[in-house]
Image (tube, rainbow, N blue to C red):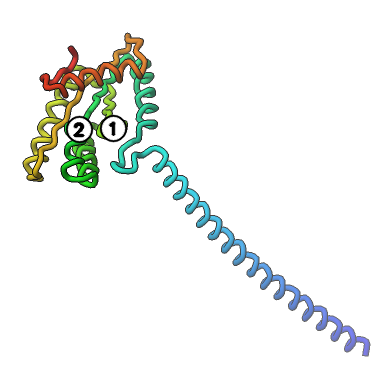
Amino acid sequence: MFLLALSSLIFFFLNKMHSINRGETIRLTNDVKTIKRLNQELEAEIEERKKMEEQLQFYVTTDALTGVLNRRTGMLMLGNAMKEAKRNWRSVTICFVDINFLKQINDAYGHNEGDKLIVAVSTVLKKILRESDSICRLGGDEFLLIMPNCNEEQAQEVGARIERRMEHYNALEQKQYKISLSYGFAEHTPCCSQSIEELLEIADRRMYQMKQGARSVIYK
């Protein structure tokens, strides 16, 4: 009788332990599934936030019309390029570019056509640059090219490439008008103490000389 009671007790105990273990296994399985789901949700949220930050960074640094750097970012890039040039004892050259007769084109063909022209010019300018160079839109019809490790001879070649590219574009597009650009270069050497504003003023003045009908003035 005692053995029967003991056997029943042991059976009950083992059955109870099995039930507990089974329940614990189910709970652990559910916990693992929950943790996996939460991790997936967290990864998705992190990825979404990363995309939003990248989009925000793009909008903050980029010109909305052309997709090149905006003025603020361009000025930061120029300042960094000048510091880097002085640190490595190298030159940095800028090119101030202006679209000729944009106002007249806007008046004759509409601002939508003018916007297309600005985008086309930005595309042409990007194609002549090296990977180390930068381009920003200063506003309106003005662009700035920032070219580290660029000397006088190389700057003259950039000017020649601008001319060739614009001639090719005009021949290809066959518009009722021809796009032309005025541009001026200014070099910042390691021994110079120019500010950003002074360097821009030199390039702007040389661009204006070309715009007034003079020949391309690069380093007068």
* Disc number for residue 192: none
- What percent of the width, then of the height, locates residue 180? 13, 33
Q: How crowded is mark 1: few (under 14 residues within 10 Å), some or many (20 or more)?
A: many
Label 2: element kind: strand
Q: Which of 197 and 5 is in front in this view?
A: 197
Task: Using the rendered view, name the quadrant where residue 92 is placed.
Answer: top left
Q: Which residue lies furthest to the bottom in this view?
A: 1
- What percent of the width, then of the height, locates residue 75? 37, 27
Task: Using the rendered view, name the quadrant where residue 155 is placed.
Answer: top left
Task: Using the rendered view, name the quadrant where residue 199 is placed.
Answer: top left
Q: Distance between the residues labelled 2 and 1?
A: 15 Å
Q: Residue furthest front?
A: 107
Which residue, given by chain and number where applicable, does mark 2 sit on?
A: 99
Q: Which of 87 and 162 is in front in this view?
A: 162
Instruction: Name the residue at 33% across, 15% down.
Output: 198
Instruction: Name the residue at 12% across, 35% down.
Output: 166
Q: How crowded is mark 2: few (under 14 residues within 10 Å), some or many (20 or more)?
A: some
Instruction: Name the residue at 20% across, 38% down.
Output: 121
Is residue 211 placed above or below 7 in the rendered structure?
above
Label 1: element kind: strand
Instruction: Name the residue at 30% across, 43% down.
Output: 65
Quadrant holding the C terminus: top left
Which residue, given by chain and number where applicable, does mark 1 sit on?
A: 135
